Image: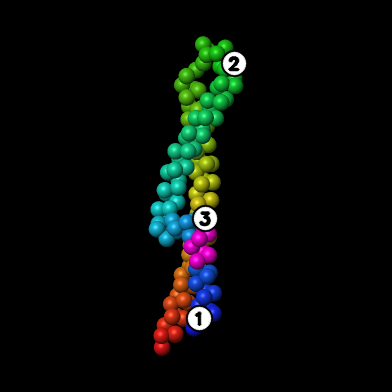
Amino acid sequence: MLNQERVCEMTRLAIFDQKEGEECRPMIQYFCKDYIAKEMIKSMISGTLAFAVIVAAFLFYNMEKVMEKLSALDIQKTAVQALLCYAGFMGGYLLITYIVYYIRYTKGRQRVKKYYMHLKRVNKLYREEET
């Protein structure tokens, strides 16, 4: 005889596994700080590449002006400006990364808690059926 309530709970668990299970797997495997640190390292690499692409595109677009001013260019001043721009860009990028992945971790953790609640309910229904 099938227990209707248990079937409903198991259906919820199966739907979670199929739709949200992959997204929530890191929330089970990592602590919050570890998850965010991993994502920030990935963002640091991708942010550096994005900054390099932006600078390269800017230089190619303004190549004529750059070539004209090349002889009068103060390399030290330009390097300091480039480092400050890079630091500002990465600071903003990493701040956004931190906020986004903290929210994702928190919401994913809540979904995992609901999953475990349903799992406990299924176990309880099995124990009740046995007795």
Q: Which residue is mark 3?
A: 104
Q: Position of residue 90 (x, y in %)?
A: 50, 38
- Spatial distance from mark 2 to mark 1, Cα to Cα? 78 Å
Question: Tag 1: residue type?
Answer: Leu
Residue 65: mark in rendering = 2
Q: Nearer the viewer, mark 3 or mark 1?
A: 1
Question: Tag 3: residue type?
Answer: Arg
Q: Position of residue 64 (x, y in %)?
A: 59, 14
Image quadrant for the C terminus?
Answer: bottom left
Residue 18: mark in rendering = none
Q: Sequence-wise, which precedes: disc 2 or disc 3?
A: 2
Q: Which residue is mark 1?
A: 2
Question: Over which residues does the magenta segment extend?
Answer: 14-20
> Are the two marked residues, 2 and 1, in contact with CB atoms closer than 8 angstroms?
no
Q: Sequence-wise, which precedes: disc 2 or disc 1?
A: 1
Camera-side residue: 81 or 6?
A: 6
- Would you identify the image quadrant in which residue 63 lies? top right
Q: Secondary structure at mark 1?
A: loop
